[in-house]
Amino acid sequence: MNRSREPEADILPTLGALTRKLRALFDDRTQAYGLTEARARLLLRLSQNGPMTQSELADAMGVEPPTMVRLIDGMEATGAVRREVVPGDRRQRHVLLTEAAQAQAESVQALTDQLRSDVLQGIAPEDVAVTQRVLRQMLENVAKASQS
């Protein structure tokens, strides 16, 4: 039976495929810097936001706290990040980029900028703006649906 499908019927599979392919492409490009996709994302997050706690990083990156601890431990062992006690709360630790990792974070940012340019090639800025607005609304709808 060949039924006409509504345009929205394919949106979730399309978004899923796009997300998987973007992550794979980002991972492929970060390997040139000796990084995994997760380590590159952590470098970017710290570079853009400054010091964050482990729990803030886990929330921001959408991973479980034990996963974040292992990621930070590995990056700390390579000298890319360090932990410091949060002033006023000795139980909390901020994660910071080391000086040695700053150049690597800048390279990953340039790689990210190029990836964005490649992916958005041929798409009008006004279409990008509409897409961004729609995606934000979808994220909001997912958050609401998760609460019910």
Image (cartoon, rainbow, N blue to C red):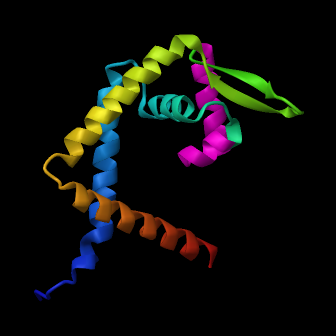
Image position of 77 with respect to 29: above or below: above
- Do we see residue 31 in this rendering? yes
Q: Residue at x 22, y 45 (%)?
A: 119
- Do we see residue 63 in this rendering? no
The spot of residue 83 in percent (x, y) is 72, 23
Count of numbered tags:
0
Identify the image quadrant of residue 16: bottom left
Image position of 91 with respect to 75: above or below: below
Q: Nearer the viewer, residue 140 or 129?
A: 129
Task: Please state, as top left, top right, bottom left or bottom right, where the N terminus lies in the image.
Answer: bottom left
Q: Nearer the viewer, residue 75 or 46?
A: 46
The spot of residue 140 in percent (x, y) is 51, 69
Image position of 76 with respect to 53: above or below: above
Q: Is residue 74 magenta?
A: yes
The spot of residue 71 in percent (x, y) is 58, 30
Decide if residue 134 is on the left or right side of residue 103.
Answer: left
Q: Is residue 89 magenta?
A: no
Task: Please state, as top left, top right, bottom left or bottom right, where the C terminus lies in the image.
Answer: bottom right
Q: Residue at x 42, y 33 (%)?
A: 37
How would you classify the magenta stretch by its main secondary structure? helix
- Name the outermost residue toward the front: 126
| Highlighted magenta segment, given as a residue range | 56-77
Q: Nearer the viewer, residue 103 or 64?
A: 103
The spot of residue 49 in percent (x, y) is 58, 36
